[in-house]
Image (tube, rainbow, N blue to C red):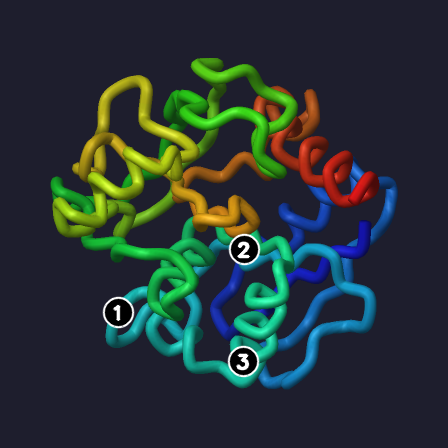
Amino acid sequence: MNATILLFPGTNRERDMAIALEKATGRKPSITFHRETELPKGTDLVVLPGGFSHGDYLRCGAMAAQSPIMGAVRDFAARGGHVLGVCNGFQILCEAGLLPGALLQNAGLRFLSMDCVLRVERAGTPFTARWQQGATFRAPMAHGDGNYFADDETLDRLEGEGLVAFRYADRNRNGAARDIAGILSPNLRICGLMPHPEDLVDPLMGGEDGLPMFQSLAETLVSA
């Protein structure tokens, strides 16, 4: 599996993501700067990691969504490519129109840095194949704008089409609508979530709770 991680000014989780991907695949991912206009040849997976792209000016992810590389990401997604956005990456995917809804400021108006418990709402996807539906796992949170919002029609569609990937299974600290922590595109090939599974992929990190996501992607894309 050939993965490329996008790097924007202010991104700060690219190394964590690279560790997770290499552990699951045995291959180092490439890093693609936001000013590039093409993805590396043979890319199977595009990953938008966490951080504070462009200092979170305007809205989180709004400026990054207009970066030159995002045209290539849109084309890649339109061809059925797999895309993962975590935290700021989720915000960018929503601002770019690749996923519906928006991430608003946390309900308590405070930055949250702590572990949470996520529940897998949709098993059998490229991002969740290693989990059973209803399984729970621990993931770190680190965000000030993780409050997922969409209108009722969009929320009903996500629920009805089984496009909610993850929900907060413990206290919903950021106020996200219907406890939604992560969602999927209709073709199940784009996923965005706020917590950081890449920060729990090794015992030295405190556990391997997040590793199944990257193993799921590796197995799916190697067999594709």
Residue 207 occupies quadrant: top right
Residue 59 has which mark? 1
User: With 104 as the anchor, is 8 left or right in this view?
Assistant: right
**Disc 3: which residue:** 71
Mark 3 Cα-neighbour bin, 10 Å: few <14, some 14–19, many ≥20: some
Q: Amino acid at mark 3?
A: Gly
**First along the sequence among labels 1 and 3:** 1
User: CA–CA distance between discs 1 and 2?
Assistant: 17 Å
Category of crowding for the residue at label 2, using alpha-carbon neighbours closer than 10 angstroms: few (below 14), some (14–19), many (at least 20)? many
Point 17% across, 37% down: residue: 175
Does residue 137 lie above or below 73 as drawn?
Answer: above
Callout 1: few (<14), some (14-19), or many (20+) C-alpha neighbours within 10 Å?
some
Query: What residue type is disc 1 on?
Result: Arg
Helix, strand or loop status at disc 1: loop
Residue 177's image quarter? top left
x then y, percent, for residue 216? 68, 32
Which comes sooner in the sequence, label 1 or label 2?
A: 2
Percent position of residue 117, x then y: 39, 21
The residues tagged by marks 3 and 2 sit, at their Cα atoms, a distance apart of 17 Å
Q: CA distance from mark 1 to mark 3?
A: 19 Å
Residue 57, image quadrant: bottom left
Q: Relative to residue 35, is residue 10 drawn left or right?
A: left
Please identify the quadrant where the C terminus is shown.
top right
Q: Residue at x 42, y 81 (%)?
A: 66
Instruction: Give, as a three-letter code, the residue at label 2.
Output: Pro
Element marked by disc 2? loop
Residue 42: x and y in percent read: 82, 65
Between 218 and 175, the one lying in front of the other is 218
Residue occupying the point 29% across, 18% down: 170
- According to the picture, the residue beneath numbered tag 2 turns out to be 49
- 187 sits left or right of 72 in the view: left
Is label 1 in contact with label 2 (beta carbons under 8 Å)? no
